[in-house]
């Protein structure tokens, strides 16, 4: 069976987001949709999967929310359901930056369409910044992109302030172009950066996923695979599932070589997190993996490890 995957977000004023949670969750569940949908006063963000009809029903319900009529989605397909369950969650922010007052509805950078992105980032006066996390950058990014080496999006503001000070010390005032998986982090980042006084700020509309959907691979400046926040782990340029697996302890992408290391224990640890987890955490992960394995032996569905929070859609 082929599943349709839709990644979406929309910044808009959403004052009654809490009241809409139950009805929205019931409708999506009834449509057979799984995935994660985040609701906040600043808008909606999510990635969901289901049948083509189920996804159409879900997106129609989201677009019926006042202010979200023009919500756009990026689509891809998978042969297996990439999510274990449906989660509709209430949040303070649909993507967490942690800087009060940052509002893309009030202040935002210039949107750049996917088919115009290559020209912008080829300009030597453009500084290209990957606003994603370090493990995402590690498996794929655009040619010439700067890696802020952030663990979470919350770290981006501090990094940028330090980076800006470095540019000023060098007497530079370049154009700043930013990108992320689906567009939400770079859009919010442009709002923050412009509030810091930077004028020439641009971001990739629709994010990497829209670029991969739009730009032929022969013309592409993308290198590697794109990390996605579901069980596919990564996608290739044609948006088919990539070559990476996931460590279900730390949720980072891992390769076959990583899985050959002694530090890799399925569901418990990998070379990236072996020194980060306590003995108590590893014991808890081991018990969780045991229950997953027992459920599989009985032919039962187990909810398994918690999927990584949908930080970007």
Image: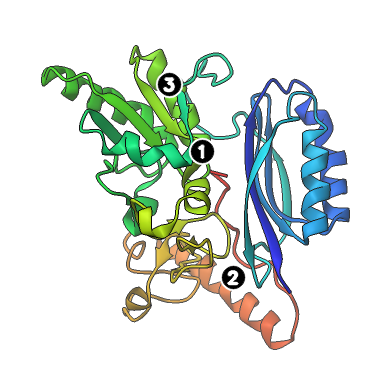
The residues bearing labels 1 and 2 have C-alpha atoms spaced at a distance of 34 Å
Q: Which residue is drawn at 53% across and 36% down?
A: 184
- The residue beneath circle 2 is 288
Element marked by disc 2:
helix
* Residue 233: % across, % down: 50, 63
Q: Which of 193 and 223 is in front in this view?
A: 223
Side of 258 where 298 appears, left or right: right
- Sequence-wise, the earlier of marks 1 and 2 is 1
Q: Which callout, 1 or 3, points to the residue nearer the camera?
A: 1
Q: Verify CB contact (< 8 Å) between mark 1 and mark 2.
A: no
Number of numbered discs: 3
| Residue 127 in sight here | yes
Quarter of the picture holding the C terminus: top right
Position in image of residue 263 (x %, y %)? 34, 74
- Residue 214 placement, left or right of 168: right
Q: Please identify, in this view, whether the residue under mark 2 or under mark 3 is nearer the observer.
A: 3
> Which of pointers 1 and 3 lies earlier in the amino acid sequence?
1
- Residue at image position (32%, 27%) is 176
Q: Residues within 10 Å of mark 1 (few under 14, many from 20)?
A: many
Residue 192 shows which numbered tag?
A: 3
Query: Above or below — where is 32 with respect to 17?
Result: below
Identify residue for label 1: 183
């Amino acid at each position: 069976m082929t599943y349709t995957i839709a990644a979406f977000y929309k910044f808009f004023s959403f004052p009654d987001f809490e009241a809409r949670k139950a009805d929205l969750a019931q409708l999506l569940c009834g449509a057979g949709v799984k995935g994660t949908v985040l609701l906040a006063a600043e808008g909606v963000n999510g990635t969901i999967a289901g049948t083509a009809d189920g996804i159409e029903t879900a997106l129609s319900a989201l677009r019926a929310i006042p202010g979200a009529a023009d919500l756009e989605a990026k689509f891809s397909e998978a042969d297996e359901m990439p999510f274990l369950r449906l989660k509709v969650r209430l949040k303070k922010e649909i993507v967490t930056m942690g800087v009060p007052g940052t509002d893309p509805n009030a202040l935002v950078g210039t949107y750049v369409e996917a088919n115009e992105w290559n020209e912008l980032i080829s300009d030597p006066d453009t500084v290209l910044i990957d606003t994603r996390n370090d493990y995402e950058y590690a498996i794929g990014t655009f040619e010439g992109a700067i890696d802020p080496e952030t663990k979470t999006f919350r770290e981006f503001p501090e990094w940028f302030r330090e980076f800006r000070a470095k540019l000023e010390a060098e007497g530079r005032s370049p154009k700043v172009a930013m990108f992320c998986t689906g567009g939400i982090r770079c859009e919010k980042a442009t709002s923050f950066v412009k509030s810091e006084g930077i004028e020439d700020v641009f971001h990739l509309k629709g994010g990497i996923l829209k670029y991969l959907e739009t730009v032929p691979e022969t013309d592409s400046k993308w290198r590697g695979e794109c990390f996605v926040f579901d069980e596919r782990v990564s996608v290739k340029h044609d948006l088919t599932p990539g070559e990476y697996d996931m460590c279900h302890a730390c949720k980072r992408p891992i390769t076959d070589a990583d899985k050959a290391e002694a530090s890799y224990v399925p569901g418990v640890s990998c070379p990236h997190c072996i020194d980060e987890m306590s003995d108590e955490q590893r014991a808890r992960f081991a018990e969780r993996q045991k229950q997953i394995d027992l459920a599989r032996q009985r032919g039962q569905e187990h909810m398994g490890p918690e999927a990584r929070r949908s930080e970007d859609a």
